[in-house]
């Protein structure tokens, strides 16, 4: 395989991995979102509100250990949110459809 094809293949694999990681983080975030997914792209409408359970109580994101975040762990939640925001902001603008 020549270097150009390998480079294209490698960049495609990296882009696909980043794409899937972002989708996974959004789905695990417990934020309200709308997702239109095709084999080639995704259009995401993301709100700054948490999803609610059947009793209308906001559902908090879970940590990797599976325990719900609470007010004592707010600092960790803010760091997580900041990290997700940074990843979203690094998406090239040509790939983002702004909804106004």
Image (cartoon, rainbow, N blue to C red):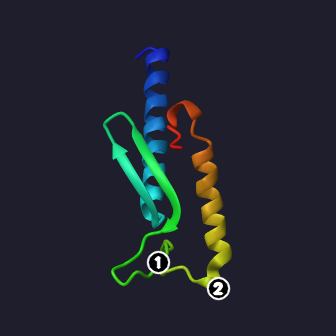
Residue 21 seen from this side: no
The mark closer to the camera, 2 or 1, is 1
**Residue at point 65%, 59% (across, down):** 82
Residue nearest the viewer, comparing 30 with 75: 30
**Residue at point 57%, 40% (across, down):** 91
* Above-or-below relation of 5 to 45: above
The residue labelled by disc 1 is: 58
Is disc 2 in contact with disc 1, using a CB cutoff of under 8 Å?
Answer: no
* Above-or-below relation of 48 to 59: above
**Residue at point 64%, 51% (across, down):** 86
Mark 2, other Cα within 10 Å: few <14 / some 14–19 / many ≥20: few
**Left or right: 2, with 73 as reference point:** left
* Above-or-below relation of 71 to 77: below
Tell me where residue 93 sits by quadrant. top right
Label 2 sits on a secondary structure element that is helix
**Which quarter of the rendering shows the N terminus?**
top left
Residue 100, x across and y down, in percent: 54, 44
Q: What is the C-alpha distance between the residues marked 2 and 1?
A: 17 Å
Name the outermost residue toward the front.
Answer: 100
Residue nearest the viewer, comparing 27 with 4: 27
**Residue at point 48%, 81% (across, down):** 67
Q: Count of labels shown?
A: 2
- Point out which mark residue 100 bears: none
Mark 1, other Cα within 10 Å: few <14 / some 14–19 / many ≥20: some
Residue 11, x across and y down, in percent: 49, 29
The residue labelled by disc 2 is: 72
Q: Earlier in the sequence, mark 2 or mark 1?
A: 1
* Above-or-below relation of 44 to 16: below
Residue 95, x across and y down, in percent: 51, 34
């Amino acid at each position: 395989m020549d270097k150009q094809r390998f480079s294209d293949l490698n960049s495609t694999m990296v882009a696909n991995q980043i794409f899937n990681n972002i989708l996974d983080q959004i789905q695990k975030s417990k934020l309200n979102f709308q997702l239109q997914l095709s084999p080639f792209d995704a259009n995401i409408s993301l709100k700054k509100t948490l999803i609610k359970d059947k009793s209308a109580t906001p559902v908090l994101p879970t940590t990797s250990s599976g325990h719900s975040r609470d007010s004592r762990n707010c600092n960790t939640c803010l760091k997580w949110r900041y990290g997700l925001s940074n990843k979203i902001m690094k998406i090239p603008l040509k790939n983002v459809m702004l909804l106004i």
